[in-house]
Image: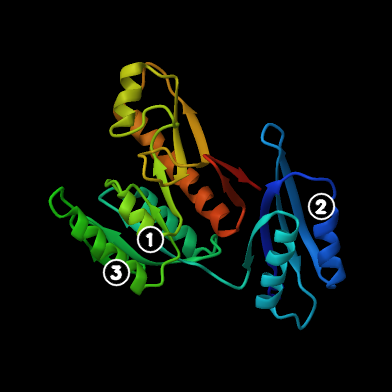
Amino acid sequence: MTSAPATLVALLHGPDQPGIVAKTAGWIFARHGNILHADQHRDMEAGEFFQRIEWTPAAGTDAAAETEDFRAFAASLGMAARVARSTHRPKGALFVSRADHCFHDLLLRGAAGEFAGDFTCVVSNHADLAAAAKHYGLAFHQVPVTAENKSAAEARQLEILRAAGVEFAVLARYMQVLSEDFLRKFDRPVINIHHSFLPAFAGGRPYHQAHERGVKLIGATAHYATAILDDGPIIQQDTARVTHRHSVDDLIRKGRDLEKSVLAQAVRWHLENRILVYGHKTVVFD
């Protein structure tokens, strides 16, 4: 089985103007690269242009130099650009509490080769999943969190992430709120799964809230974590139909299936460099 060629993926956005697609394609062509995928979107209301383009550089090309050259080229068009190399596999951390369905699902998918990155450690405020993490060959760090020790606990978590070289984190039903200070100091993407179709039923016990309201649809939402609880840019959502015959336990069971698939898709898209965040929204090149 032959391995796929190393590629570069660029995500760029900025004010819309004529000829951007032709110019980016022309830049790659002039350097003897081969475009594999290209997609673009225009926000009609904001007049903003977004593009994802993936190409194989010419043989012998210095990937680091090509990356910097493309960023400079994009800047000359008034575009901000992020460029990633397919040969780089970002290191991730899983934050968990006691619920294990998203934890196991992500790690099994990772073992099956579904993600273009690797989980390197598990951080938890409880000890419940220590043995399971060891089974997957991952370092497990228990950091209890209380209202009194939250600042010290988050400082310890940051030490763990930095020591492991973590480049992204996933809150796999981690039942603690990360502070604005933590997110600012970590300064890396944090993907959260919320067990409701946001913006409905934010906060705690969303399935109970949904049952009390007699909803006919329940959902799950994966989003980037921000300082405001359950308010970050949404990456992926899905729903399941329910009726008055379903109990809270039924909603929780159905919801867990949604949570697993929605979170896995969000992680996959993130690691494949398919997500552009702008303002309070995302563009996902799926």
Q: Secondary structure at mark 1?
A: helix
- Vertical arrangement, residue 154 with respect to residue 14, above or below: below
Q: Which residue is mark 3?
A: 159
Q: Quadrant of residue 49?
A: top right
Q: Which badge, 1 or 2, comes first in the chain's sequence?
A: 2
Q: Is residue 257 above or below residue 132?
A: above
Residue 165 location in percent, x, y?
41, 72
Q: Reading the chain from its start, which is encountered first: label 3 or label 2? A: 2
Dot 1, crowdedness within 10 Å: few (<14), some or many (≥20)?
A: some
Taking 89 as reference, is 66 left or right?
A: right
Q: Dot 2 corresponds to which residue?
A: 21
Q: Above or below — where is 44 with respect to 260?
A: above
Q: Dot 2: within a 10 Å radius of its alpha carbon, few (fewer than 14), some, or many (20 or more) residues?
A: some
Q: Give the color scheme: rainbow, by chain, secondary structure or one colour.
A: rainbow
Cβ atoms at labels 1 and 2 below 8 Å apart: no
| Disc 2 element | helix
Tell me the amino acid under the disc marked 2: Val
The residue pinned by badge 1 equals 186
